[in-house]
Structures are given as structure tokens and as C-alpha cells.
Amino acid sequence: MKISLSHIKTKLRSEKLSVYVLLVLMVTIWSFSFIIVDFAVAFLPPLSIALYRFMITTIIFIIIDIYVKLRKGRDISKDNNEIKTKMTKNDWYLLIFSSFTGVSFFFYTQYNAIDIIGPSLSSLIVCLLVPVIITILSLIFFDEKLDKFKVIGFVMATIGGYLLITGGDITNLTPESPHFIGYVLALLQPILWSLYSIATKKLIKTHATMDILKYVSYLGVIELFFLVLINGEFIGFINGIGNIIVFLCVLYLSLGCYVIGYYIWQTSQHKIESSKVTSFLYIEPFLTLLFSIIFQRSEVIVFWNVIGGFIVLVAVLLINYK
């Protein structure tokens, strides 16, 4: 039986729409994570929170593996109809690189930035620069193209992001600012995340997405454990494990942000262009600001912050226009 061209186009549009819906879910989960971390750092140092988070994440992946093997007796990657191949030496190098840039170093800089400058500003900085950096790297490594709508969209998003971050006052980003170190740490986030995204995008071409997330999580736990020891936080980390508030925060960060959020991020990059996937990050700081207001996280919101948020939303629509 022949399948009509219109039927194929309808199916492709439906698949793309489902990817966009999942990306909105991912961005919402990640937006609220900045508020969650802001709660958690009142009880435990940032590095210890990161280790706690990925210990829980690792346990979740082990439970998923056991459940799938017991129930269906076959590999997770086969359930997802993804390619299953052996890891080469270069793949392991990429995995280790990904664990440093996407887990240990990334969350060390992010959680400290949130502790110093607050959840919204940290979110704003990473979400402003990540799409730009990833788009540039994708042009270099994956030959992705930019059309005029994307170019205009990225320019608008940059302007809107600037207004969101500074509120129209550039002195907030100068060394004289009392929170300058926080800004430096926050600015490291998009660089690390962009490198992580490019590395893992190479890996998921030949390996199951869930496997990549699992191995990166395992390596991240080892790295974070040694960083906690070096930083002299181990005793405080052990004492903080029994805190129910910290546990609930970490559970949200591990299950929601990593297992679900990262999975959506990786699979989306496999299905649509990286520039379109990363453009959704422009929504994240706007949502974080909204959550920050709702939960009264001591954020200073001015007129230009609101204007910048609307500019960013329009930019996302332009970037994804086709």
C-alpha cells in the first residue's frame, strides 16, 4: 500500500510538534531547578549538593536497568530502537570529557554562581550564551546552516538577554560589582555546557541516549566525590544526607533535571537542528524570573527585565520559524 506524500509530511510535523512539547517541559523543569538549588544551598555547600544529586541519579539509572532487564529481558537501547555498539577508546575519551564539562565542573560553577548572584541571574547568563556558542560550534562540526530568521532571532535574543541580565545597567557586569566572582563563574557555564552538548551529540550518533547519560552520571559521581574530598566537605556532606529538605531538592534535580531533562535534550538534538533545540533555552531565564517572584527569592525586577523577557520570547519564535 502506497503512503501519500501528504501523510508523510503530516507525520513529520506531528513528530516535530511532540519534540517541541517535550522541550517546553524540559525548559520548565530546568527553570525551576535554579530555585531548588537556591533553597538547597542554605543547608549544604554547592559541591556537596552536586555529589548528592548524582549519587541519587546513579541509583535511579541502576533501578531503571534492573527493571527493564527483569521485565523485558533486553537492553534499554533496544527498547528505544537506538543503535547499540561497543564503546571505543575515543568514545571513552568523549565520555570523560562530557562528564567534566556537563557534570562535575559545570555544576560546581553553576551552584556556586547561584549561591553568589542568585538563581535568576545565573539562569540568564547561561541561557543567553549557550545557544550562540552551540550554534557556532554546530556550524563548524555539523555543517548546520543559518537562515535570515535565525540570524534575526539570535540578534534579538542577545539584546533581550542583555536587558534581562543587566536591567539596562552595564555596571552590573564590571569588576567593581560586589558579585563579580559570581558573574565569572556564571559565564563559565555556557562554555562548559556547549562543549558538553557537542561532545554528546557525537556520541549519540552511534550509542543509545540513555547509555550516554548513564555513563556520564557514573563518571560524574567519581569526579565529584574527589572534588568534595579535596574541598574538605566530606563530613558536612555526610551530615547533610539526612536532611529531608535537601533530599527532596536533590531528588527533583536528579530525577527531573537530569534523567528526564537531559534525556529530552539529547534526543531532541538527534531529531532536530541543534540551533533550534538550544533556542528553547532563551525561555528558561524568563521562567526562572517568574518562579523567583512567586517564591520571593530576593530578586530585583525592573521594567527593562520584563521588556527583555518579551524580546527573548519573540526571538525564540523567529529562530524556530520555517
Image (spheres, rainbow, N blue to C red):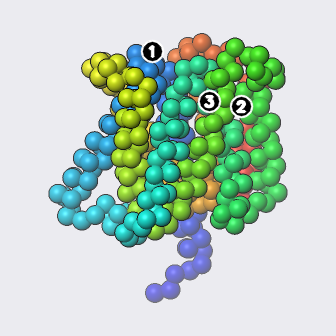
Q: Is residue 223 above or below residue 147?
A: above
Front position in the image: 48 or 122: 48
Q: At which x and y percent is residue 37?
A: 48, 25
Residue drawn at point x = 65 percent, y = 23 percent: 181
Q: Is residue 269 above or below residue 262?
A: below
Residue drawn at point x = 72 percent, y = 51 percent: 319
Give the residue type that dot 1 points to: Ala
What secondary structure is marked by label 1?
loop
Residue drawn at point x = 44 percent, y = 21 percent: 45
> In the rendered image, which residue does mark 2 sit on?
309
Give the residue type that dot 3 points to: Leu
> In the rendered image, which residue does mark 1 sit on?
42
**Sequence-first tag of 3 and 2:** 3
> In the rendered image, which residue does mark 3 sit on?
185
Front position among marks 3 and 2? 3
Q: Are marks 3 and 2 in contact (CB under 8 Å)?
A: no
